[in-house]
Image (spheres, grey):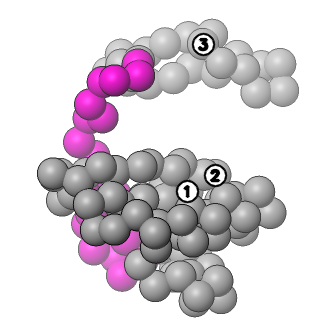
Amino acid sequence: MNKRDNVVTMKANPLTLLGPEIAPGMAAPDFTVVNNDLGPVSLFDFKGKVVVISAVPSLDTPVCDMETRRFNQEAQNLGDKVKILTVSMDLPFAQKRWCGSAGVTN
């Protein structure tokens, strides 16, 4: 896997990123994540649709909670040709709990 050192920092400490750099206009590489029901979901599952990927550290943080709620609201106006995926480091059980408390069903 391609390692990229010193590309970004966190609290002034350099971090190493893994994988190729993605530039605007490039197609995202396929990936597989686990949904709230412990089932696999891949980017390929949404082939033919515009996919917006929102990556957040945790849905249990105020900014990530607000961002994800807003994306969910906006998604309702975009039709079925557009999908918004929020990927977090939370366990599926925590994601499911957050979705229930936030009223998110999609």
Q: Tell me which segment is drawn in magenta.
A: 23-42
Whether residues under marks 1 and 3 lie with C-beta atoms below 8 angstroms apart, the answer is no
The residue beneath circle 1 is: 89
Whether residues under marks 1 and 2 lie with C-beta atoms below 8 angstroms apart, the answer is yes
Which three-letter amino acid code belongs to the residue tagged 3? Val
Near mark 1 (Cα within 10 A), the count class, few <14, some 14-19 or many ≥20, is: few
The residue at the point 54 percent across, 65 percent down is: 74
First of labels 1, 2 by sequence position: 2
Which three-letter amino acid code belongs to the residue tagged 2? Pro
Label 3's element? Answer: strand
Quadrant in which residue 101 is drawn: bottom right
Quadrant in which residue 103 is drawn: bottom right
In magenta stretch: residue 76: no
Residue 91 horizontal/vertical position (percent): 52, 69
Is residue 91 among what the camera can see? no
Question: Distance between the Cα atoms at labels 1 and 3?
Answer: 21 Å
Quadrant in which residue 67 is drawn: bottom right
| Numbered mark located on residue 7 in the image | 3
Camera-side residue of 80 and 102: 80
Please indicate whether residue 90 sits to the left or right of residue 47 in the image. right
Question: Distance between the Cα atoms at labels 2 and 3?
Answer: 19 Å
Label 1's element? Answer: loop
First of labels 1, 3 by sequence position: 3
Which three-letter amino acid code belongs to the residue tagged 1? Met
The residue at the point 34 percent across, 68 percent down is: 79
Label 2's element? Answer: loop
The residue beneath circle 2 is: 57
